[in-house]
Amino acid sequence: MAGIEQINMGTSVSVTENDDCQVYVIRNETGECVMTSYEIMDGVYVMYDDVHMKSMVSEIRHNAEVFCLDYCYVGRLEWSLNNGSCFYQQAGDLSMDDRQYVTSSYFLPLNHYHAVTVSFFLPQAQESTQENLKSFPVDIRKLKEKFTTEPYPYLIRNNPELDTIFKDIKNAKEKNKQAYIKIKIFELLLYLDSMSTDDLEIKNEYFYKSHVAKIKKMHEMLINDLEHHYTLEELSRKFDIPLTPMTSCFKGVYGNTIYAYMRKYRMQYTANALLQSDLSVAEAALSVGYTNPSKFSAAFKQVIGALPNEYRKRKVNNVIV
């Protein structure tokens, strides 16, 4: 098991050894993170990350030369960097790094993050790929150097070929699972080796932690005051952040514009309230700042897919909308 023993898990991680995998669990007051790791080849590991929490501080430390590929298929994750900035990974994003420039603090804007992580521990990973497939042309260390030239992770967004490879790894059947994943890893290495960084349009935004802190406070205020519809100008003045960085940073952190995010949040909030109370549609509308029930109903249908009374009736009758 060359590689995995070179990770210091710290005291916050509980470890369970199974026949074919290891399960790592981190729990705190905001939720739980479960990471299931499979050794595919000597020095090559695939980990399935299922995280349901708001934030965590990880004690995990890599005491080896690593090249890590993190593919997010659901959710959103804030990576905090040593240079004082943050970036956000969302569904369909592949992040690649050597774990040298990211901090141990993680924030989940949507309270969940699901990913597949492929880790290569060098030099063992290079040796085992050569042993498993003679004359395999990819030098993993050179591949690592190709994608870790800057002091921050390399991010590729919405690449259909990478999406397919990682989804195949994610959905691998139990029968012959590790053999199947091994083939997909060779395919992944070949594809990354064929890519030219000059041809990739990487549109990753990095945000100052001071701006991010203000946006998080703004978000907390907005979701706790649903009756008030703030203008962008009001928010800009209240949190002392210019309009342009405010709007771009909010979208970077939470994945949508302030207006679109809050509209969806309000409709999901009232959808839950309609099922758990006897609120009328007019009362539900007022609870999230809509004085016109017709406008509320129209917005509700656009977001939820049914009019409020129709939604309540279908749910009560156990019909999924």
Image (cartoon, helix red, strand yellow):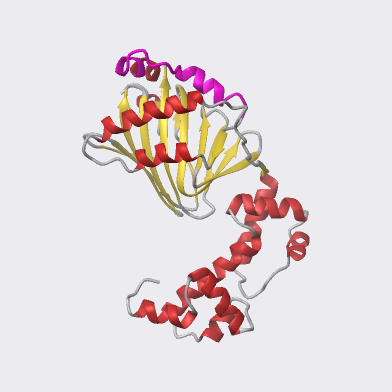
Quarter that holds the N terminus:
top left
Above or below, comparing residue 274 to residue 85 in the picture: below
Who is closer to the viewer here, 110 or 161? Answer: 161
Residue 181: percent from left, percent from top: 32, 33
Residue 312 vs 217, above or below: the answer is below
Identity of the residue drawn at 52% across and 42% down: 158
At 42% across and 80% down in the image, what residue appears?
A: 312
Q: Is residue 128 above or below residue 226?
A: above
Asked if residue 77 lies left or right of residue 312, the reply is: right
Measuring from the top left, give residue 184's x and y in whole percent. Answer: 36, 31
In the displayed structure, does residue 98 sit left or right of residue 13? Answer: right
What residue is drawn where x is 31% and y is 15%? 131
Q: Quadrant of residue 203?
A: top right
Q: Which residues are magenta?
A: 129-151
User: Most extreme residue toward the top, as rendered?
Assistant: 135
Residue 242 placed where, x, y %? Answer: 78, 54
Decide which of 107, 245 is in the foreground and name it: 245
